[in-house]
Amino acid sequence: MTAKVPQSNQNLKLIETEIGTIASDWKVVPLSKVADKPQYGLTASAAKSGNVQFLRITDITSRGVNWETVPFCSASIKKIDPCRLKSGDIVFARIGATTGKSYLISDPPESVFASYLIRVRAGEELDPSFLIHYFQSSGYWTQVDANKHASLKMGINGSILNKLLLPLPPLPEQKKIAHILSTVQRAIEAQERIIQTTTELKKALMHKLFTEGLRNEPQKQTEIGPTPRNWDLAPLEAKAESFQYGTSVKCCYKAEGKPVLRIPNVVGGHVDPTDLKFGKPKSNEVGKLTLQPGDLLFVRTNGVKENAGRCSKFNGELEDCYFASYLIRVRLDPQIMNADFVSEYSRTEMGTSLLSGRSIRTADGKFNINSGTLKTLLVPVPAIDEQEEIAKTFRLIDKKAASTQAKKTNFEGLFRTLLHQLMTGKLRPQ
């Protein structure tokens, strides 16, 4: 990051305004005073071909716009010209789930925007990069939400945008604020790219290691596809010590009794101990349902087919906890099967198909597996030392992903703090 750190300016006055605290040398202005009149987009039909690309609400994601996937439309030049996009344009979703979300256009191809978007162009006193950051602030969203709830369709329109109030620092300061916030945003985006790359790497490595192993052995064809010649293949029942359903005792958020792990805690790969509920197990369940590090928890019912059979390894994230009836615990013999190895295999394409692919749809639309499904799950069985090496490889990738996610979270927290303080004048860029 190359932006200079903003500094607190205790000697500069802050004043209260209709949009909250701002620096005393700033102004509060309606958007109509510093931007062109908001403009609605072109009404047309998206198509695979046409004479101009056609940007819609659905083409704008949290990662921006992938112009290669944006469709085309056909319209006369007379209709296209007023709606052409250029760098510095800001488009808003005016209705739907993303109402009020905005996006700054940068170096667009020959393109127009669709009718469910509204465009704003900043005037000479206003830097577009500053404006797009203000449109992420609480000061902006407070105004938008108030106006949305006053609208029958919960949308916004050009009139609402025109009346929006915003702080207006001097133009040089706007550019500095935008530079600082954009620098942090780029750092967040860099972490997102690393996470995506790491995820793709792990997926590719999972396929390679579970089909080729680590020893460069010749392969053989099995019921689960190619595997190294010296690997065995066995139903999970032959390698497990026990299969156990959880308790049906009612649990709640009130911290009474023991913590109980439920479907939301089994995120796939690891246990997420947030969003905990608590309950009082029956006397005959206390020992039987106690979890030990290395236990595998499988989701046995889910509304999404691919999540039936989702697996997480319990690593001792909580002490003295047990698990609910919608989960099945599998306890392995660690001398024969490595729990991390089995957990990772369950998330391969083959492992998922063997679990969720055999789930049964119930009358209420959910997909169920049972202990019989798990017992007959075919798993590859290399030597225990090779299992451990493969599991260690995946742990290193997961550690890298977790470290990157932590950095991303820290940058996101920094961005929120700077956004608030810079947009209110509590911090001034030096």
Image (cartoon, rainbow, N blue to C red):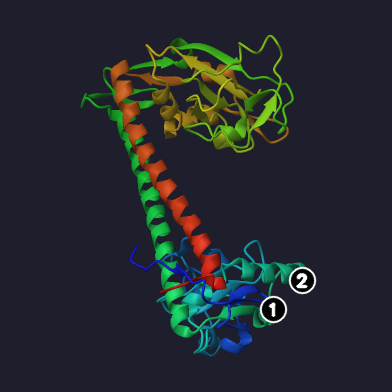
| Residue 216 picture quarter | top left
Q: SS of the residue at dot 2?
A: loop
Q: Quadrant of the C terminus?
A: bottom left
**Picture coordinates of residue 342, whole percent (x, y):** 42, 23
* Residue 62 visible in the displayed image: no
**Picture coordinates of residue 99, whole percent (x, y):** 64, 67
**Picture coordinates of residue 197, whole percent (x, y):** 35, 49
Checking the image for residue 160, the label placed there is 1
Q: Can you identify the residue that label 2 sits on?
A: 151
Label 2 sits on what residue type?
A: Ser
Q: Is residue 269 above or below residue 38?
A: above
Checking the image for residue 403, the label placed there is none
Mark 1 or mark 2, which has the lower sequence index? Answer: 2
| Residue 297 picture quarter | top right
Q: Is residue 188 above or below residue 76?
A: above
* Residue 65 horizontal side relative to residue 246, left or right: left
